[in-house]
Amino acid sequence: MDRSPHEIELVDAAAPKPGAMVELAPGVFWLRFELPLGFDHVNAWALADDDGWTLVDCGLDTPEVRAAWEALLSGPLAGRRVRRVVNTHAHPDHLGIAGELTRRTGAVFCTTLGEWLHGRVRHLEATAGSSPSARAFLHHHGVAPSTIDLLDRQPVDMSAFHRALPPYEFYRLSDHESLKIGGSRWQAIIGTGHSPEHMALFNDERRVLIAGDEVLERITPIIGVWPNEPEANPLQAYFRSLERFHRLPADTMVLPSHGRPFRGLQARVQATAEHHRNRLKRMHDLIGEPDSAASVAAQVFPRAAERGHVRLALAETIAHLQWLTTEGLAERSGSPGDVRRYRACAPWDDVRVPRP
Ligand SMILES: [Zn+2]
């Protein structure tokens, strides 16, 4: 067993090449696809399901991922029908090719109502271009007009990201409901913060958690405030999700969407909460004088612009400032139409941050 800095134990298995799969527990297989993003891969899972397969997540819809699925369907998955395609959440690196896979195999598509709607709406919006309220949102948070114009001119990448569309017909899973797969129950654990109604699947009998993006091995999922819900407090929701994962059995094998399978869920949940605590403290320190979210984001994420991550950095910054404001540690000024500025209005208080 390897040890990573977060005191977790990596599962001793070599990562599968695209088009291959690796068995981690009886009937639980690890699949991995290439990803042309900041990280280079996304994981998916195949569960042996009586006379067929249940697949969990699909990878981004790129020619490479399509080729990998071809290899899987005519190779290790051949001989049994694909019964279900389960989607943890509608982000394109997880939803990707789900439409094509379900059409081709006749599989039932399973996800939560929130993710199904989110995926369908995002697909519609991708073709509509940026709305005036999205521009106003950037302006209210202090993004310079020239940067807003620049962001607006960035072409919408229809090749992969926005093409992902949840199939029209789906089977809805709600919190605590379960799917019986290969004779044992996988219970849905719904979390919010990273996406509207993210679904992890936990098998208590076999002590396996398919964590999606909610708990990751090294990185932390983006927790952001987006223009369509400007007063959201996703960090509060995410802290609640982390508490639920923290209560699962300590010997659970965690299968995250990015990184490697591991044990040590509690250590990883605590490290993730600590990461946000540190970020909250840092931002609280930065707003001794009133400042906009864009200005705070530029200090906390100095390389966001060169990486093309301005919107992501801003969304994540607002999420933390919003949490500070809701907790009474910061206040927000600026009348409607003005740039909003945040200012610390109470001393930093560690106790306020939830600790799983
Ligand atoms: Zn995601």
Image (tube, helix red, strand yellow):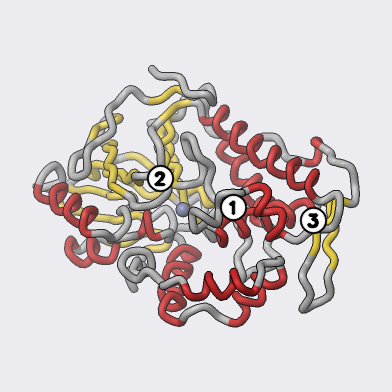
- Is residue 42 shown above or below 159? above
Q: Residue at x 46, y 77 (%)?
A: 125
* Mark 2 in CB contact with mark 3 (< 8 angstroms): no
Task: Check the picture and name the quadrant holding the N terminus.
Answer: top left
159 left or right, relative to 307: left
What amino acid type should be assigned to the residue bearing mark 3?
A: Thr
Closer to the chain start, of discs 2 and 3, is 2
Q: Circle 3 sits on which residue?
A: 326
Closer to the chain start, of discs 2 and 1, is 2
**Among the 4 quarters of the image, the one containing residue 18:** top left
Q: Secondary structure at mark 1?
A: loop
Measure the C-alpha gap from mark 2 to mark 3: 32 Å
Give the percent coordinates (x, y) of residue 271: 60, 32
Give the percent coordinates (x, y) of residue 341: 80, 63
Label 3 neighbour load within 10 Å: few <14, some 14-19, many 20+: few
Q: Secondary structure at mark 2?
A: loop
Measure the C-alpha gap from mark 3 to mark 1: 16 Å
Q: Circle 2 sits on which residue?
A: 39
